[in-house]
Amino acid sequence: MTAQSEKFAVFRCAASAVIGFGHLRRCKALAERLSRVGWVCEFATDGESAIDLSQRWPGGVTLLVTDGYDIDATFESACRPWAKTIVVIDDLADRHHDADILIDHNVGRRAEDYAGLVPSGCRIFAGPGFAVLATDFPERRQSLVPRTASDSSEPSIIVSLGGGDTALQRQLLDTVLEGVTLIGDPVEVVAVVPTEQQTADVVARGFTARTGIDAAEMTELIADADLAVGAGGISLLERSVLGLPSLVTTVADNQKLGTEAAAAMNACQDLGPAASVTPRAIADAAGALLSDRAAWIQASGAAARVTDGFGTARIVAALTAGSTDRDGAPVALRRAGIEDTELLLSWQRHPETRAFARNTNVPTSREHAAWMDGQLACGTSIFNVVIRDDEPVGVMRLDKLSGDRSGYEVSILTDPRLHGCGLAAAALEQAPYLADGQPIWAWIAGENTASHALFCRAGYKPAEGGWYVAVEESVAA
């Protein structure tokens, strides 16, 4: 196996009953998505050294992905002669890394948090728009979000406190189960636990326990639930994608930033550190949310705005497409956020933009803000900001189609000051990685000659009524 003949990636990540399995879940999600587009992915054993890896795969690798608190710049630098590109997944921003790309999908994380910790040329994909989640979650979101409040007389609560089996987590499980029994009204409880002993503890209280479940099963458990009581970290992001209101307690330091940031967005309720959570606090918070339909709907919408779950696809597009503008500067996609509202409005109001839009009326600030909010809470919109050297330069949306056309409609808008720089073409190259094999359509106004030429060069074919459709080709080719 050689880096020259294959798109070949090796993953080195940490996992144990003490630290949990979040690192492994992230790496498995990225590996699965890479495999869909033609990469060969293999996993090293936790603890293998740089020398071990080079001996195991002497031909070298195209991509080395690391994820673990025992890994830093010392290990990564030792892998430089053997790995063409090094990707680091982190969530602490507390140590140096020798990375070409660094991913930290924590809610509230900013690229500036890694200033001085990575080389100057390192590309940083920060925030929940780059959430490294299994494909099951964004796929399920499209048919589930926005959610409606349940009318069940026995609402369902999912309890998920992480994959670790420490004394703290066992005590927390007991506290949570005691808390849900104090709610008063009848509830159905499903607890996702990692061990047989924890399974026995759950069953002894008369609740349902699930262990050894995969991403597809977790997706359906979250979709079927009315409320979650759980840990932060990757589990919080999974619940957010599917718009599930959550009561969150932090079981590790790396969960603190994301939980507090999500709570500030009203996307969850922060119960505080696991050691200080009480059964009464859980019962009161759960009972209040389950009994207030308006509050539940608001919490669900806030959770859905945190992330759309397409972060893994955005990362794979950046790693695989290698898109650049006409001067060779890298172009990538990040998820749009409410903080982009004013910038996007300025682009939308430009005369060149309005001239070729379906609706040529100039939006008011209030109309645009409402539209942005709706797009971010919508399960059928993949809403991206196009970035060049980490600066926003455009927008690309993929909206799920229904009716006569299947797949997605793509819409592209670039900063009017940067037309002719190749930004729209670079963004469009990455659309198939988000669409994941589904048809991509584009509607273009008849007089918009630049867009007609753009989509023709990208391989789209004219259809009736001003539409173009992508000629289906695998992005694995």
Image (spheres, helix red, strand yellow):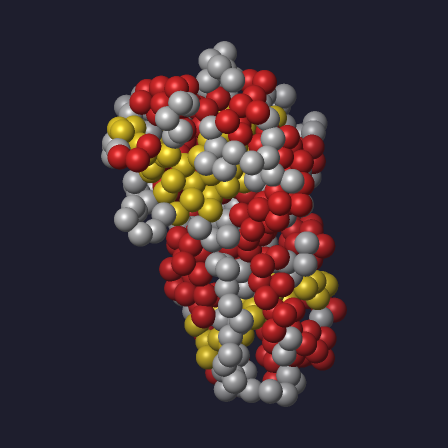
Answer yes or no: is residue 62 visible: no
Q: Quadrant of the N terminus?
A: top left
Residue at (50% x, 27% y) in the render? 355
Q: Nearer the viewer, residue 157 or 255?
A: 157
In the image, is residue 163 above or below residue 123? Answer: below
Q: Nearer the viewer, residue 296 or 70?
A: 296
Q: Quadrant of residue 260?
A: bottom right
In the image, is residue 280 above or below residue 162? Answer: below
Q: Work out which residue is located at the far top of the displayed protein and give it.
A: 327
Residue at (33% x, 32% y) in the render? 466
Q: Position of residue 47 (x, y in %)?
A: 49, 43
Q: Quadrant of residue 161?
A: bottom right
Q: Position of residue 450 (x, y in %)?
A: 41, 19
Q: Nearer the viewer, residue 163 or 354?
A: 354
Q: Position of residue 337 (x, y in %)?
A: 61, 42
Answer yes or no: is residue 263 visible: yes
Q: Quadrant of the C terminus?
A: top left
Q: Position of residue 372 (x, y in %)?
A: 59, 45
